[in-house]
Image (spheres, rainbow, N blue to C red):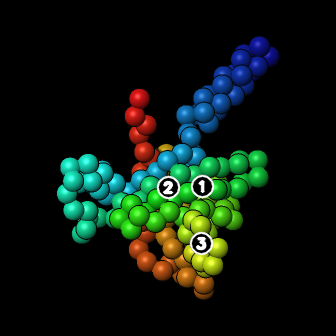
């Protein structure tokens, strides 16, 4: 009976480790649905004005410190932003974005949620804590190999 209990405990631990390894969390590259159309138009030499918002975000996560850093590429405006003061709590996270190379820029606060393994919902936050606009939905970018 003791052997069976030890076996079941070991099996449960193995399943937990596999499940944890399969969920990459927030770390990685995320993009809006507009990225594919923007890239295709640019490669074809067509106008990119009037296209849906094309944003790519690269998140780096320090799980030991629950810290989030990274960068944002706002393709439609050709602006890049740094992610600062990011914090991760379970499936929710917050950070400030600051335009790269602009030390005078005021940080813009954001709040996000990992809604599933491949989708995040991200909202700009007003100083009072309310959402400033409707959420921006991003999907995990598929790496090209």
Cβ–Cβ below 8 Å for labels 3 and 1?
Answer: no
Q: Position of residue 59 (x, y in %)?
A: 57, 52
Few, some or many residues within 10 Å of mark 1 (<14, 14–19, 20+): some
Q: Position of residue 1 (x, y in %)?
A: 76, 15
Can residue 65 be seen from the camera position used here? yes
Which of the 4 image quadrants contains residue 50? bottom left
For label 3, the residue is: 102
Q: CA distance from mark 3 to mark 2?
A: 18 Å
Q: Residues within 10 Å of mark 3 (few under 14, many from 20)?
A: few
Q: Earlier in the sequence, mark 1 or mark 2?
A: 2
Label 1 sits on a secondary structure element that is: strand
State the residue in front, 4 or 59: 59
Residue displayed at 51% across by 73% down = 124
Circle nearer the N terminus (3, 1): 1
Q: Going from the N terminus, do you reach mark 3 or mark 2 first?
A: 2
Q: In the rendered view, would you say 144 is above or below 49?
A: above
Q: Nearer the viewer, mark 3 or mark 1?
A: 3
- Left or right: 35 as drawn, with respect to 22: left
Quarter of the image containing the C terminus? top left
Residue annotated with mark 1: 70
In percent of the image, x 72 and y 25: which residue is there? Answer: 9
Q: Quadrant of residue 136?
A: bottom left
Report the residue marked by disc 2: 57
Circle 1/circle 2 CB separation < 8 Å:
yes
The span from disc 3 to disc 1 (Cα, nearest Å) is 16 Å
Name the foreground residue: 124 vs 38: 38
């Amino acid at each position: 009976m003791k052997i069976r209990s030890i076996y079941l405990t070991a099996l449960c631990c193995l399943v937990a480790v596999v499940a944890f390894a399969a969920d990459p969390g927030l770390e990685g590259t995320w993009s809006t649905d507009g990225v594919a159309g923007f890239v295709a138009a640019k490669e074809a030499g067509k106008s990119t004005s009037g296209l849906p918002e094309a944003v790519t975000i690269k998140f780096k996560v320090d799980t030991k410190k629950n810290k989030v850093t990274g960068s944002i590429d706002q393709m439609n405006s050709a602006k890049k932003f740094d992610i600062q003061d990011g914090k991760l709590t379970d499936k929710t996270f917050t950070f400030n974005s600051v335009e790269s190379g602009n030390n005078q820029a005021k940080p813009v606060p954001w709040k996000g949620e990992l809604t599933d393994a491949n989708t995040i919902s991200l909202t700009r936050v007003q100083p009072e804590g309310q959402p400033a606009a409707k959420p921006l939905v991003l999907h995990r970018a598929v790496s090209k190999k």
